């Protein structure tokens, strides 16, 4: 297993190198070895999977069988896991105290105080059980009936997705990696490392506007709701139907673009390279930005003045999302912060919870990037692993959802749309890119979508057409529009859903004290690989930001 882990780490590092703009001869040589490394990894994985298929035939006794299961399985099978109720009992308390103890050892007084606040919250919530837990005293008839109805609904949804078909169209125009996408009406807006923001007309798959103005790579986009666009349009004497887009860039600027006229109407200089942003539609409206140094800032939509600056994270802020008055920020070191927007003129954001990478079990990799998607009391996290993490942000409980059939899978982004949870997955071993679909709120696996030579998907946006069909856009090396087709009619090249039987038994698993999901990063590299990590870390100002925009 040691060589497998080593190869997986090498391939992950090569993938990070490939998205740099400039490469030295040594880096080019490493990239040229990718095909050979993939071939060797596939060979080893095939050898490891062999004995698992012949258990009970080769070898004698229970001891040999158990040994193979431990060595060959990437993680414990759901049937081997203890019941969720047993895992959950007392875990909040022990995890919170352990985290507080680690922070006490590091001498972080202020962080301890904040963590103690969450410990107290965990104690209170420990008296309550999760809604899905069955009462140990017996079976609740109402709950049993509800579960049966959910199961019928899930089977119907799964059957419909088994017949799903999508037609893909590539939008050509960017000359570098697409880092962010957002949908506005019949338009798709994309930002790229090539410093441009492009507007695309989806029905005709043509470029509508080319918004050039940033002097650095574009890292993030956000679309304010129509009512906030109308307010700004009135102050600028533009049409009340005008739509605006926010873009953040490595040039330390947030630009506000009027889509119909294709012009920048406002530019905000933030003094920091902008790596994430979102619009919060509360009161006058707020723009929340994250920087490559871990700073979170709030800007008033009415005056465009800075209302607050907080040193919130240790490394680059890689994802910011809002949910009502709540704002969620995630960083390259794996930390997640939850903020309440009090809609004050000064200092509107108040920290509710902060969960470090030690709690989320994300982070720890050079060039890492955490993306998040909140839903109620849960936050779905993607951080370059074969799993999606689910953080219960009020208590710090973490569970995980398998998003790939082997540990060589890399999850780059997670998105919710119309009752679906969608996770992208890229296989380091063979270069295959996949979108996995799960039902909400149960998080049960539905189907997968992929096609030959599919590129790695780094960003995702989705909406429904007037007829209720899905339209998606994915970005990475290619910008692709996905259009769901009616039941009949199919052309060559159309993508059809398929089921990965290895994900069929996927269940939500509560994380214990093991580090199974980090095992591919525990292997000690040789000196050359250590130098490579250090060169990535020192090449610019912040982890994920370095890899994407150098």
Image (spheres, helix red, strand yellow):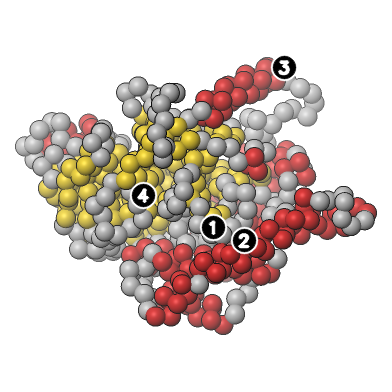
Label 1 sits on residue: 430
- Measured Cα–Cα span from mark 1 to mark 4: 20 Å
In front: label 1 or label 3 = 1
Outermost residue to the right = 61
Q: Are marks 3 and 2 in contact (CB under 8 Å)?
A: no
Q: Earlier in the sequence, mark 2 or mark 1?
A: 2
User: SS for tag 3?
Assistant: helix
Label 2 sits on residue: 42
Q: Earlier in the sequence, mark 1 or mark 3?
A: 3
- Comparing 272 with 118, the one in front is 272
Counting from the top left corner in percent of width and height, residue 368 is at 47, 62
Label 4 sits on residue: 475
Outermost residue to the bottom = 527
User: SS for tag 2?
Assistant: helix
**Which residue corresponds to the image point at 77% horizontal and 52% vertical from the top-left?**
52
In front: label 3 or label 4 = 4
Label 3 sits on residue: 141
Q: Are marks 2 and 1 in contact (CB under 8 Å)?
A: yes
């Amino acid at each position: 297993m040691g060589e497998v882990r080593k190869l997986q780490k090498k391939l992950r590092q090569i993938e990070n190198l490939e998205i740099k703009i400039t490469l030295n001869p040594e880096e080019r040589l490493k990239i040229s070895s990718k095909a050979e490394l993939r071939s060797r990894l596939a060979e080893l994985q095939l050898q490891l999977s062999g004995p698992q298929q012949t258990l009970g035939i080769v070898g004698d006794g229970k001891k040999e069988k158990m040994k193979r299961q431990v060595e060959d399985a990437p993680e414990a099978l759901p049937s081997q896991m203890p019941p969720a109720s047993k895992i959950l009992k007392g875990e909040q308390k022990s995890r919170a105290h352990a985290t507080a103890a680690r922070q006490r050892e590091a001498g972080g007084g202020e962080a301890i105080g904040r963590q103690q606040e969450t410990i107290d919250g965990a104690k209170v919530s420990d008296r309550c059980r999760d809604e899905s837990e069955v009462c140990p005293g017996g079976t609740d008839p109402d709950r049993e009936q509800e579960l049966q109805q959910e199961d019928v609904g899930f089977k119907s949804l799964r059957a419909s997705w088994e017949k799903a078909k999508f037609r893909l169209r590539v939008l050509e125009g960017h000359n570098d990696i697409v880092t962010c996408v957002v949908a506005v009406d019949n338009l798709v807006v994309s930002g790229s490392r090539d410093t441009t923001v492009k507007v695309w007309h989806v029905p005709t798959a043509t470029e509508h506007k080319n918004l050039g103005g940033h002097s650095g790579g574009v890292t993030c986009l956000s679309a304010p709701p129509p009512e906030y666009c109308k307010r700004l349009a009135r102050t600028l004497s533009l049409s009340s139907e005008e739509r605006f887009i926010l873009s953040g860039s490595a040039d330390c600027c947030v630009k506000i673009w009027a889509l119909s006229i294709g012009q920048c109407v406002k530019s905000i200089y933030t003094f920091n390279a902008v790596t994430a942003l979102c619009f919060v539609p509360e009161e006058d409206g707020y723009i929340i930005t994250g920087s490559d140094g871990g700073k979170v800032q709030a800007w008033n939509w009415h005056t465009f003045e800075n209302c607050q600056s907080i040193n919130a994270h240790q490394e680059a802020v890689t994802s910011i999302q809002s949910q009502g008055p709540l704002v969620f920020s995630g960083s390259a070191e794996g930390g997640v912060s939850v903020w309440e927007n009090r809609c004050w003129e000064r200092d509107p954001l108040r920290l509710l919870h902060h969960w470090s990478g030690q709690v989320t079990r994300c982070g720890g990799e050079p060039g890492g990037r955490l993306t998040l998607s909140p839903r109620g009391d849960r936050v779905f996290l993607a951080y370059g692993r074969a799993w999606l993490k689910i953080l219960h942000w009020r208590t710090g409980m973490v569970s995980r959802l398998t998003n790939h059939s082997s540990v060589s899978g890399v999850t780059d982004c997670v998105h919710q749309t119309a009752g679906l949870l969608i996770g992208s997955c890229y296989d380091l071993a063979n270069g295959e890119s996949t979108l996995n679909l799960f039902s909400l709120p149960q998080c049960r696996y539905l189907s997968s979508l992929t096609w030959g030579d599919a590129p790695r998907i780094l960003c995702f946006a989705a909406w429904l057409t007037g007829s209720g069909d899905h339209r998606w856009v994915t970005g990475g090396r290619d910008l692709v529009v996905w259009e769901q087709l009616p039941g009949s009619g199919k052309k060559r090249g159309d993508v059809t859903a398929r089921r990965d039987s290895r994900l069929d038994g996927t269940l939500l698993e509560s994380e214990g004290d093991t580090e199974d999901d980090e095992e591919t990063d525990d292997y000690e590299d040789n000196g050359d690989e250590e130098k490579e990590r250090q060169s990535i870390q020192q090449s610019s100002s912040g982890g994920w930001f370095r890899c994407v925009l150098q």
